[in-house]
């Protein structure tokens, strides 16, 4: 007989016809009843979970995460707490000192953007720390790295003509590598550190951490040349062992060389192929996001588009003809204009796709762009947490006028764009309550209003919850009306907050913690 349980609390169902309830019944992995407590009376032998006045919601989805990189982050020393160049160099010096002979040293999450005196170490400064040890320091956004001479020599990149490797006036590498420029170094480091045993251990640990946040589904994006590769076989192994307590939809940065379509298998099993992931530009932090005007803090830099229009359309066209969904990274206004223009052109040729195009980030949007995105039926995958993390960097990069045009959540929603919520982890924290709180209040993790942005762009709490519950399933093309909501017939994927979120002060929503997670009717946290 299937296991039966009753969950009681302040239930937000996500169902517009019946948005609030007091109790629901689960049999096996499905919800069979939702209503008032008087309607859902526990039977003898049923498990009962009474969460009082705390908010119960559908389980959360992170609709853009680099899960493999998030799991592997624990393998490498994290230098994100350094708050000056001197502290960073001291940290790196200690890691090199403890390194075994012949081993590369890679440190992650270097972020100078919030320092009082922002500075980036040079190749020569790293050489003084590590003359014989290959050293790679990765920026927090994964679009920028710094390496020493030994790393360049051992990777064969010293004489490389790759445009992503910066060279000084003397023609020698400065140490800076942008976007995929560090790929050869990353591959050597992965071979040394990322054994199957290590990946299994760190992946299992990461899955448990995500479950503790109320997350029950991931849209995992593969980008190995950015050190953001995925390992589906590791996830499959964990699933076979009963240790994969979430649904994983996988996006890859190349079209598969075999016949497959997006959506197949999304309602069966825990791992599914979701589509193609492309990058149209880089990042604001590395000044590689493509802008229509120069960066405010570097007047000769506009960023860069990674594809000419025809090459990008060729990829979009090929995917749509094969019924494969495409998710496209675009941050700067020039990149967003290019992507939307190319999607419009492809859809004039081929019509609307079976699975909607997805625009990931969409941080800087020109006037009228939300409406164009809506008319093209493009989904926008948001990362509200980046409004907080970029609060010091983005204004200096963009200037006051352009910064005021970032994160246009309200304009996009009012235009009718389907919006999803995500973290881009490991670049940002995957806690959904951070994203929900920031999207609904325009306040940071400190509870204060975010300065310099348009505060009218915030969403309602209901809209912010939808970003992380029902909307990601709609973005995948799931149309059964039972995914990401709590209705009879839906999978029993449930998250429970530690308070009644609708009664909290705006500055306290980001402080909400998840107290319980159910996946397919089983309590996994």
Image (cartoon, grey):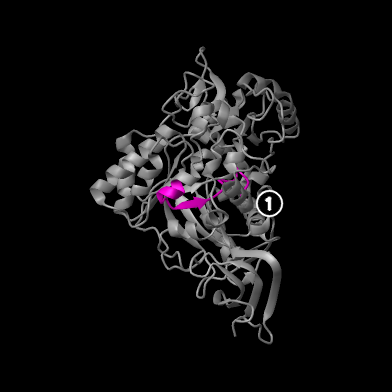
| 180 drawn magenta | no
Residue 58: give x, y in percent of width and height.
Answer: 57, 64
From where the camera sits, is residue 231 visible?
yes
View extreme (left): residue:
349
In this view, the residue in front, 357 or 168, is 357
View extreme (bottom): residue:
44
In this view, the residue in front, 382 or 430, is 382
From where the camera sits, is residue 427 visible?
no
Q: Is residue 352 above or below residue 135?
A: below
Task: Find numbered disc 1 in the image and state the secondary structure of the residue it sits on.
Answer: loop
Q: Is residue 372 above or below residue 53?
A: above
Magenta stretch, residue numbers: 412-430
Q: Quadrant of residue 7?
A: bottom right
Residue at 52% in and 12% down: 170
Where, quadrant-wise, is the N terminus in this rendering? bottom right
Q: Quadrant of residue 451?
A: top right
Q: Is residue 241 above or below residue 250?
A: below
In this view, the residue in front, 83 or 379, is 379
Q: Rate crowding at label 1 as few (under 14), some (14 to 19) or many (20 or more) other CA atoms within 10 Å.
A: few
| Magenta-drawn stretch, dominant element (helix, strand or loop) | loop
Residue 431: give x, y in percent of width and height.
Answer: 63, 51
Residue 441: give x, y in percent of width and height.
Answer: 60, 47
Residue 327: give x, y in percent of width and height.
Answer: 42, 47
Residue at 64% in and 23% down: 119
In this view, the residue in front, 415 or 219, is 415
Residue receiving disc 1: 505
| 429 drawn magenta | yes
Where, quadrant-wise, is the C terminus in this rendering? bottom right
């Amino acid at each position: 007989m299937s296991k039966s349980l009753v969950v009681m609390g302040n239930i937000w169902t996500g169902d517009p016809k019946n948005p609030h309830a007091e109790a629901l019944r689960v049999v096996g992995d499905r919800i069979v009843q939702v209503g008032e407590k008087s309607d859902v009376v526990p039977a003898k032998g049923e498990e009962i979970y009474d969460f009082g006045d705390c908010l119960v919601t559908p389980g959360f989805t992170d609709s853009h995460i680099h899960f493999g990189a998030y799991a592997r982050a624990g393998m490498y020393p994290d230098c994100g707490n350094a708050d000056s160049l001197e502290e960073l160099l001291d940290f790196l010096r200690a890691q090199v000192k403890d390194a075994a002979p012949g081993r590369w040293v890679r440190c992650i999450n270097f972020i100078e953007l919030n320092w009082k005196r922002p500075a980036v170490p040079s190749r020569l400064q790293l050489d003084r720390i590590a003359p014989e040890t290959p050293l790679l320091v990765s920026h927090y956004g994964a679009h920028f790295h710094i390496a020493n001479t030994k790393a360049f020599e051992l990777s064969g990149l010293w004489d490389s003509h790759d445009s992503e490797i910066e060279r000084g006036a003397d023609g020698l590498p400065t140490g800076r590598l942008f976007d995929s420029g560090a790929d050869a170094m990353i591959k050597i480091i992965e071979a040394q550190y990322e054994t199957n045993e290590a990946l299994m251990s760190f992946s299992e640990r990461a899955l448990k951490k995500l479950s503790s946040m109320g997350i029950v589904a991931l849209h995992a994006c593969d980008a190995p040349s950015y050190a953001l590769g995925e390992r589906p076989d590791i996830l499959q192994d964990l699933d076979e062992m009963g240790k994969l307590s979430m649904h994983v939809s996988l996006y890859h940065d190349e079209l598969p060389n075999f016949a497959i379509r997006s959506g197949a298998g999304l309602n069966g099993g825990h791992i599914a192929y979701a589509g193609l992931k492309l990058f149209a530009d880089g990042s604001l932090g590395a000044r590689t996001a493509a802008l229509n005007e120069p960066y405010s803090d570097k007047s000769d830099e506009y960023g860069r588009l990674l594809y000419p229009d025809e090459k990008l359309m060729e990829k979009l066209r090929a995917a749509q003809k094969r019924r494969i969904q495409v998710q496209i990274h675009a941050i700067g206004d020039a990149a967003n204009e290019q992507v939307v223009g190319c999607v419009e052109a492809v859809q004039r040729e081929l019509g609307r796709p079976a699975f909607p195009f997805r625009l990931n980030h969409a941080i800087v949007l020109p006037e009228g762009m939300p409406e164009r995105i809506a008319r093209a039926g493009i989904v926008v995958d948001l990362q509200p947490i980046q409004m907080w993390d970029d609060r010091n960097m983005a204004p200096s990069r963009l200037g006051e006028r352009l910064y005021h045009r970032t994160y246009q959540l309200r304009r996009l929603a009012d235009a009718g764009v389907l919006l999803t919520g995500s973290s881009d982890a490991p670049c940002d924290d995957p806690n959904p309550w951070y994203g929900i709180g920031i999207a609904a209040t325009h306040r940071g993790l400190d509870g204060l209003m975010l300065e310099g942005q348009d505060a009218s762009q915030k969403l309602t709490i209901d809209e912010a919850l939808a970003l992380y519950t029902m909307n990601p399933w709609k973005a995948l093309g799931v149309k059964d009306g039972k995914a990401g909501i709590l209705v009879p017939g839906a999978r029993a994927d449930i998250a429970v907050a530690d308070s009644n979120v609708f009664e909290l002060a705006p500055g306290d929503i980001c402080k909400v913690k998840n107290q319980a997670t159910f996946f397919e009717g089983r309590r996994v946290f």
